Every structure is written in structure tokens, then in C-alpha cells.
Image (cartoon, coloured by chain):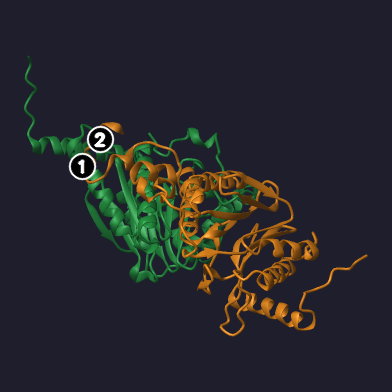
Chain colours: A orange, B green
Amino acid sequence: MASHDSHAGRLPGAFTSPGPSSFTDFLGSYRPELLPGGRTPPAVAAGEEIPHGTTIVAATFPGGVVLAGDRRATAGNMIAQRDIEKVFRADELSGIAIAGTAGIGLEIVRLFQVELEHYEKMEGRMLSLEGKANRLATLIRSNLGMAMQGLAVVPLFAGFDEDHGAGRIFSYDAAGGKYEEREFHSIGSGSVFARGALKKLWRPELSEEDTALACLHALYDAADDDSATGGPDMIRRIYPMVASVTADGFRRLSDDEAGGLSQTVVDARYQAPGGPAAPLR
Amino acid sequence: MSMPFYVSPDQQMKDRADYARKGIARGRSVVVLQYDDGILFVADNPSRALHKVSEIYDRIAFAAVGKYNEFENLRLVGVRYADVNGYMYDRSDVTSRGLANFYAQMLGTIFTDQNKPYEVELVVAEVGEDAATDQIYRLTFDGSVADEHGFVAMGGQAEAVAEALKERYRDGLGLAEALRAGVHALEQQDADRHLDAKALEVAVLDRNREHRLFRRLTSSRIEQLLTEAAGEGPSEEGAEESAEDGGTGGAESTEGAGEAGGADGGDGGDGAGGTEAPKGT
């Protein structure tokens, strides 16, 4: 192939040269400026005026995993957007959600989605869940320079592992450290409150719907105590985004479903503002 | 110093074209046809590992005949082209017309500039909202592009196959009937050739799916569709063919069940199948 690289019409050689099945690596050789890692971090730390995404939760259930996020983006004390989407389909069997600098996070999600699909098409097989999680770690690590200047992004990655027949959750730090989480996890500014709630609410035998409900309770608790996390907006009908991944694939709950569950949470809070009580003994 | 013999450009191009045509005619055929829900690809290809039909993008697929390493190269380049454009702009900005032009330039340049032309013929197909907006482009080794409607047959005994397809094809066929028509046409490559599910590579671009519309059909599904079509077929042939299916059905249904247990058809790497190159030399 190398012999006709320079002649192949208007094709740059990068297209025809043999190379890895990774889209990021290819883009790095063709248009490096399009990669998040290819930029020089700003000399001074970015302020709070750039929108940030907030709380994400994930919890497993028998045969799958639920991923949910609130809909608020904040810039300092301002609400930058009240219906931002922070939970995405990564591929047929996995989902990704982001907290931190929204702009860079959305770009990394887009790149990650193409990365997984590109590999699948080039190789004719899907990456293993572990392989996908490792690729994501590399993408996050490439953003370390930006993270040091206050533009950090941390994703939560969850998917169905065909080899184990179960849902799995992976969390990351800004340096690209990958950590597998058992049972449930949360990230973002309200994550402390959300995780506390999930500790009391989550049980291994919960169904898909009940797991989603537990996640919505956790997000409600996060919104209750963290000003950067948005609760369900019953007036504008903006509800937290909930997705589940099972052997049947990634499924985003419709607005009706998420709205119904949110209504259940809100109704319950009229009786007990602190949410469902766990038995003491 | 010896002078090379003078060969007129006319003769040179003719020789190259003859060379490429011979190479393509040695292989086995592929047919592409529109059916009511999209576009169907049927290849006479027993290999589960080396594909003649592949996914390029959400609504775009690729079918090829000729020399495997050459069209595989074109496929990889096409996937890169599509993914880069989809990432730089938007997913809706990747079109079959752009891809067909891209391939045309590449093939044209290779045909005129290189000693050996590519021995390939391609179809780039994009499924639209309805049959009228489906696009099928056929590209030949010299970079010429033809805009096709209804059906295309290429490779091997392409004329005989196209002739047979013309008789049975009509607009708005169902999937089973379209598959039956395609398989019948492929069986006209040789006298008394019978193709069963295992000898076929079948894929569809189904406009009713979500996200990525390309799907391969498993052998058990192909088997089922062929049986279904034989039942509904014209009376005199229907009887003959259902008898034929009955005869071999026992052995094949066990095979089909085994395949159905696996992942999406053909994605598993079947090492043994790989030794059988699609180009039947």
C-alpha cells in the first residue's frame, strides 16, 4: 500500500496506510488537533465560569446495570443549563456518564463512542468490557494537563459483561486511574450524599425498575444537599436521565418512564422528606 | 541501454481493463437488492471470517467481489473516511455519495497510475427513509460509478446472475422473497448449483432499526427465511424446493441451532473458515 500513498487521488496517506484499529490513534496521525490530548493546556487555571456537570450514580442488578444522572450544569453559582444530558450510550452493551467540565467531557464521550464503533467495524468483533474500560482510561489520562488547570473530567462507565453475564461499573480519577466498583457507585459534586443514600437503599436482589428507583432516590438526596445537583423538575417535566444496560443492550428510559419513577420519589418525599427509612435492626 | 517497447495508451488501458475483468470473473458473485424494509446483500461465500459484505456507517454498507486483500483495504479506508467525517461534522453528514466519490477517485488513480489495477468491483449502498430514497452505487475497477436501482449483481458469472435476478425481482419484495430471489440468482452461476444457508453470507440494512442499521443474518435465520419463501413460492417450484429442503433439513437444523447460540452471526472468528478465500480461484 505504501507505494501508492502519495498518488491515491485526494487521499492523504494516513487513510490508506495500515495501522491499528483504534480511531484515536488514527486521528492522532491524521488530524492531531482534533484530539482532546493534542492541545496545550491554558497557562492559568480556568475559573468557575465554564459549565460543570454534577452528580452521576450507577448500580448493578441481576443481569445488568443502571446508570443515572441529574440534568443540571452549573457555572459558579449560576445554573448554566437545566436539561443537560450527561448519560450516553457508549455502544450496544455499555453506557458512559460524565461529571466535571462539560465541554471536554462531551468531547471525550463522542470520541469514545466512535472509538468503540470503529474498532468493532475494523476488527469485526466488539471489544471486551475490560478493553473498553482501558481505552477510556487512556482518553481520560490524555486530558491530565487540562485537569491540572481545573478542567478535569471524570466519567463513570458501566456495561454488561458478556463473559461474566453481569453488569459492571468502572470509575476513574483525573489521571486516568481505572477502578472497578462493586454493587454501586456515584461521582460528581453530590456523590457523597448519593452514595450514602444508595448504601441504605440498594440491595442485590432489586429488579431493574427498583434499582432505577433507588438511583432516583439517591439523586434526589444529592439535589437535596448539594446546590450544584438538580432535582426532578416536575413543572418543566425535566427528569433525571436513567439508562439500563442488559444482555439485550443499552436502553434509555423514556421521559414517561423516568417521569413516572420521579413522581413516585417526589410523592414519597411528601410523607418522609428524608426518603425511605432503612430498618435499624 | 535498452528502450522499452512503445505501447499505445489505448492498448495499455485495454490490457489493464482485461486483466481486472478476468480477475473479477474468476470469483463468485454477490447480489444486492432492495426489499420493502431496506437493502439486502447476499454473497456466495462460505467463510464466516472473511466477509464480502460489511458495515461502513449507520446507514451505509459495502459489498465487494474480486481480490480479498484489495477490497478489504478499500473497506478499512472507507470506515476511516466515514468515522473521521462523522466525528468532525455530524453523523448525518456521512453519505454514500461522498463515499462513492471517494472510492471512485481512489480506484481511478490506482487504475491509471499503477502497473496493476485493483481487481475489484464494489457496491456502496445507503438505506433511506423509503425505497425511493435508497441509494445504490456500483463502482468498477477503473473508478467509474453507476447509480443503480432495484438490484445489482457483480463478480463471477455476473451476467447470468443478473439475468436470473431480473426475472424474479420486483419492487417491494418482502425479506424472505427477496432472499429467495437472490439465492436463486446466485445458483445460476453454475449448472445444478445448490446454495444452502451455510454457503451464504447475508446481511441487511434495515430502515426500521435504530442507530446502526446494518445486521448480519445468522445461518439459522437464513434457513428459516428460505423455508418460509419456499412455502409461499410459485406452485410448481414450491413443491420441488420444499422437498429439497426436507431432504437436507435434518442435518442443517442442528447446525443452525448451534449457530443461533452464538453471538451476532459471523462475528466469531472461525479460524478454519478463514482458509477458504472468498475469491474462488
Task: List x then y, in percent, for residue B200.
Answer: 48, 48
* Figure quadrant of the N terminus of chain A: top left
Q: Of the residues shown, which amino acid type is indicated by label 1?
A: Thr
- What is the x, y in percent for residue A206? 78, 64
Up/down of B234 relative to B87, above or below: below
Between A256 and A196, the residue placed more toward the observer is A196
Residue A4's mark? Answer: 2
Relative to B139, say whether B230 is above or below.
below
Image coords of residue B95 (percent x, y): 33, 60
Q: Is residue B63 visible?
A: no
Residue at (25, 53) in percent of width and height: B101
Q: Chain of mark 1?
A: B
Q: Is residue A280 left or right of residue B7?
A: right
Quadrant of the snapshot with the C terminus of chain A: bottom right
Q: Alpha carbon of mark 1 to alpha carbon of mark 2: how far?
A: 9 Å
- Mark 2 packing: few (<14 Cα in 10 Å), some, or many (20+)? some
Badge 1 element: helix
Q: Residue at x 61, y 60 (%)?
A: A188
Residue A127 relative to residue A63: left or right: left
B266 lies above or below A51: above
Q: Amino acid at mark 2?
A: His
Q: Mark 1 and mark 2, same subunit?
A: no
Badges 1 and 2: C-beta atoms under 8 Å apart?
Answer: yes
Residue found farthest to the top: B1
Viewer-proximal residue among A65 and B2: A65
- Residue A58: image quadrant is bottom right
Q: Position of residue B251 (x, y in %)?
A: 63, 46
In front here: A71 or B89? A71
Asked whether residue A96 appears in the rendered view, the answer is yes
Residue farthest along the right direction in this orientation: A281
Q: Which residue is mark 1?
A: B109
